[in-house]
Image: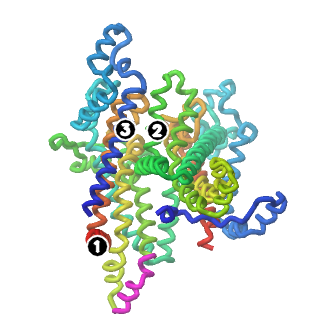
Amino acid sequence: MAMAEQTTPKPVQAPKGGAAAGGAMARFFDGDVWHSFKNSPITVVAAVVTVTIFLAALFAPIVSPHDPYDLMLLDVMDSFMPPVWEADGDPRFLIGTDDQGRDMLSTIIYGSRASLFIGFASVLLSIVLGVGLGLVSGFRGGMVDAFIMRVAEIQLSFPTILIALLINGVLRGVFPVEQQADVAYAVLILSIGVSGWVQYARTVRGSTMVERSKEYVQAAHVIGIHPTLIALRHILPNVMGPVLVIATIHLAVAVISEATLSFLGVGVPPTEPSLGTLIRIGNDFLFSGEWWIAIFPGAALAILVLAVNLLGDWLRDALNPKLR
Amino acid sequence: MAAFIVRRLIQSVFVMFFVALVAFSLFRYVGDPINQMVGVETSLKERDALRERLGLNDPMPEQFWRFISSAAVGDFGISYQHKRPVSEMIALRLPATLELSLISAILSLAIGVPMGVYTGLHRDGLLSKVFMTVSLVGISLPTFLIGILMIYLFAVKMTILPSFGRGEVIQLGWWSTGLLTTSGLKALIMPSITLGLFQLTLIMRLVRSEMLEVLRTDYIKFARARGLSNRAVHFGHALKNTMVPVITITGLQLGSIIAFAIITETVFQWPGMGKLFILAIENVDIPIMAAYLLMIALFFVIINLVVDLLYYAVDPRLRIESGTAHGHG
């Protein structure tokens, strides 16, 4: 039964220990993962787009033409400027400005920074929670396993966005109203991170149960290594392969979740907006004709998610030995 | 079969108990219910009296029992913000959400299954490729973005569809329906497409991959060898056998549709339960949150049960297996 539950095929891992860094690099460019990457133009495009957005977000203060957070630099006269190619466009603002006179391009760059930060942090939290619980579940078995897996099943039967909303609502209740803007990031990361652990846990549990019965684990038991150490040092590295694939696709989901929560008004506050908050703000001006305030952040979000999804799809196939 | 149903029932009860416990702890421990109910000028003594009267000093299991038993008869307390019974507020908004969700589900099935069959049969056709690409974009675009784009196109630019609300509704007893008026139907178009699009792509991809798999099997080859018409092979033999996973996913997705209605309802200002829930989260209106949570959980549990039972109706193999297992046992 345990074997049957392990639906994600585990990639065959080449032994990596002891190889010099240079050798590992050379082997990577020689290997079939790189080969399949090179031969898939869509994947290359997706990778370039993803890396560009990541870098822009990372170096937002350097890359963006304006600083949208510096209130001193904002001028109300600049508000609602359309993109340059429209009649009233201003060359200073390539794709226009929003209701407060903030440059759209800069807010989008800063917005993807916020979105990606929350996305990465949530994925990391999910990985820590999911891999940890999956490892415990698969390694210990018995009552602990049964309990964790029942909780996972219950959580899995509800959509993640609903769980995230719920955790979000609870955390909002815990913090007093005046603090909520300060803890908005933490609340989002917690709600998205906690809502996403199940997939990791189920996958890692499955692989752990397979690894547990293998000889190297038995050997480690025999020479008297502490079980915790066996789980962490011996089993963990061997079950991390599929986690990478899940994490890539999960990043896209996490970014969408953040945008959705922010759009619904329970996410990042408008003072330091994320992509979702920007779309929420822009939505209010859609009817008065200022389409660019909503459409450009929306396009940025869609492109980012599509690129990451494509990368994840490719990675899943490239690491799956069955499809080669 | 009986043993299976009983096991599933026990599991469902366990889930409901767990969710009720979460809802109860929300209600009891997130913020002080007393503070939410009374004004600032209420004295400590009055607060204590109210606390005693509401039974908040009773032992926890007793309070939990009272919470469950009143929830079971539809009493979810009074909304902190609106000072009205939660059950009344939900009953007012339930028809809007259910109509929207049902129409979306029907839409996604009615379009998704034929599209899936087509792309499965004509794998390399141009139209199939178009369908597949569009569906990839559809999966990557967040629901609310699709909604906004549609509003911009059809409400702002072309002004042919209303961008918010349900239009005119007709009252049938306590149920208010927008299905009987033109403005109600027009108001339904964009929200239901927005809500159903993700499910549509999901169903299409599922039917496609199932069709591809089934078409490779021996009994299809045999059916062709017998000289049956394409039509009979495709729809009589192949499609029938793709239906088991489709039923599962569609059934499970029905719950998701109701949950995702939260987003669609916010975009289109649809006066349904999802909108109520979002406002409750924004204002930390715990009784509404707890009630919504319990209702959705009940819904999910019932759907899961029905889907499991449908398996037996659709797939005769399961009946035979359980029958022999029963005979041996």
Q: Which amino acid type is shown beneath numbered disc 3?
A: Lys
- Numbered tag placed on residue A260 in the rendering: none
Callouts 2 and 1 in the same chain: no
User: In which quadrant will I find the C terminus of chain A?
Assistant: bottom right
Q: Quadrant of residue B2?
A: bottom left
The numbered mark, 1 or 3, whose residue comes first in the sequence reads: 3
Label 2 lies in what chain? A
Q: Which residue is mark 2?
A: A264
Q: A95 left or right of A65?
A: left
Q: Quadrant of residue B87?
A: top left
Q: Which amino acid type is shown beneath numbered disc 1?
A: Thr
Q: Residue at x 31, y 55 (%)?
A: B7
Q: Secondary structure at mark 1?
A: helix
The number of discs equals: 3
* Image location of residue B169, percent across then percent down: 23, 43
Q: Secondary structure at mark 3?
A: helix
Q: Is residue A151 visible?
A: yes
Of circles 2 and 1, the one toward us is 1
Q: Please tell me which residue lies in front, A296 or B47.
A: B47
Write down the region rendered in magenta. B213-226
Q: Which residue is mark 3?
A: B275
Q: Please tell me which residue lies in front, A185 or B43.
A: B43
- Numbered tag placed on residue B324 in the rendering: 1
Callouts 1 and 3 in the same chain: yes
The reply to whether the magenta stretch includes residue B157 is: no
**Predominant SS of the magenta segment:** helix
Q: B8 left or right of A267?
A: left
Q: Are marks 2 and 1 in contact (CB under 8 Å)?
A: no
Label 3 lies in what chain? B
The reply to whether the magenta stretch includes residue B216 is: yes
